[in-house]
Image (cartoon, coloured by chain):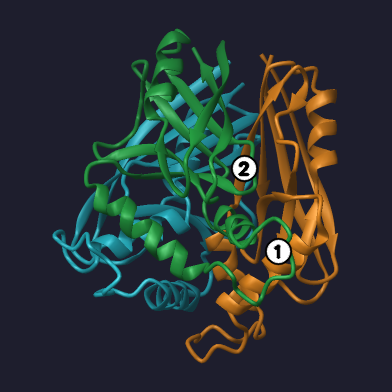
Chain colours: A cyan, B orange, C green
Amino acid sequence: MRQAQKEITVTTSGQGLYEISAAAQALARSSGITTGQLTAYCRHTSASLVIQENADPDVERDLLAFFRRLVPEGDPLYVHTIEGPDDMPAHVKSALTQTSITIPITGSELQLGTWQGLFLFEHRTRPHERKIVLHAIGE
Amino acid sequence: MRQAQKEITVTTSGQGLYEISAAAQALARSSGITTGQLTAYCRHTSASLVIQENADPDVERDLLAFFRRLVPEGDPLYVHTIEGPDDMPAHVKSALTQTSITIPITGSELQLGTWQGLFLFEHRTRPHERKIVLHAIGE
Amino acid sequence: MRQAQKEITVTTSGQGLYEISAAAQALARSSGITTGQLTAYCRHTSASLVIQENADPDVERDLLAFFRRLVPEGDPLYVHTIEGPDDMPAHVKSALTQTSITIPITGSELQLGTWQGLFLFEHRTRPHERKIVLHAIGE
């Protein structure tokens, strides 16, 4: 059995998708694992993970627009407002997406589909340093 | 350590849930793994995975109705419309559900609950060939 | 390779978040695994899993308020009502969150972020006994 694990830091500059496919693929390759799986795990509650299309940038734009409308800032519903108007919406958006995603490895390659990218989904307005743990296991 | 991996194809005929529990269970059994886990991974950005009740078909009907109302087609919010009115909603629905699901294996059996089924969730209107990678690991 | 697996029961008393971080961490430590990963899997379709902030209780309150408003009970949209007005909304909320979450283990510790807790998300009004399978793998 082989394993490889690495924590990466993604520096974000506001709400949006930040692709981490290359870092995940690099760990899979360097691990020496030919068949196995890689898990990405986001260590935050106001940012999350998502697999999305990485071809047309309008998809990212529309996805962000949808989430902003579904979970608006300044919503009078919230009591938890001390960390800013974008904080509680960020927690909700994180709950609505994924904190961990596991991708199979075949022939040393992540089995991402043709149009798939693995993204950190930043939900806060201000810049953040986001920590993602990548863990590969297999042989 | 034992592993087994298989890519399956699900032919879809419009929006809905397509159960893949049997294929996942078959891989778990044939792998020789008694204790471990199985990951299902959807290689698309306009279809996803969900665990849902597989007893009453009305649950599927109501789930689809909810998602259609929450993420309507023809929404003027979207810029990415060149692939049809159901494409961007499909990306959003995928983000709101799961791309990977991992189920423990005990005594060679997937630990699905009594009422649980593992489903491909097709979000596009037209028929598609969907690829799902199943990966089991354990011993 | 090492593995450890345990099914835990969480007794719920209505809608809310029930933290299971300690049980997951205990399994990781007792497994003897120093580097690996732990998967939590919820065996129900009207309860789910979520990683959320475990510091300010208002976050839980606001998260519940958001989900109650997004997926209201007594919605005329639903046909599946025989199990009560909170049942179909519970299925939808489960689909919108996660059924499995995988967390890396480093130095025998779950790599939860500083503010992260792992929670069972109960979507039903009445008390339930919820089964969650924890599975650790690594070495």
SS at mark 2? Answer: strand
Along the line of sight, the residue nearer the viewer: C54 or C104: C54
Instruction: Identify the residue at horizontal 32%, vertical 55% (top origin).
Output: C61
Along the line of sight, the residue nearer the viewer: C53 or B77: C53
Chain letter for mark 2: B
Name the outermost residue toward the left: A82
Instruction: Identify the residue at horizontal 77%, vertical 58% (top origin).
Output: B130
Residue under label 2, please give it.
Answer: B101
Query: Within 10 Å of the Cα at label 1, are there few (<14), some (14-19), or many (20+) other Cα atoms?
Result: some
Q: Nearer the viewer, mark 1 or mark 2?
A: 1
Q: Is residue C115 left or right of residue B89?
A: left
Above or below for C122 versus C118: below
SS at mark 1? Answer: loop
Whether residue A109 is visible, yes or no, is: yes
Along the line of sight, the residue nearer the viewer: C38 or A36: C38
Residue C101 at x, y = what percent? 51, 38
Query: Within 10 Å of the Cα at label 2, are there few (<14), some (14-19), or many (20+) other Cα atoms?
Result: many
Question: In the rendered view of the protein, which quadrant contains the N terminus of chain C?
Answer: top right
- Asked if the residues shown at circle 1 and circle 2 are in contact, with their CB atoms under 8 angstroms apart, the answer is no
Tell me, for residue A44, which label it has, or none.
none
Chain letter for mark 1: C
Residue under label 1, please give it.
Answer: C81
Residue C2 at x, y = what percent? 55, 10
Marks 1/2: CA–CA distance: 28 Å
Above or below for A98 versus C127: below
Residue A5 at x, y = what percent? 41, 28
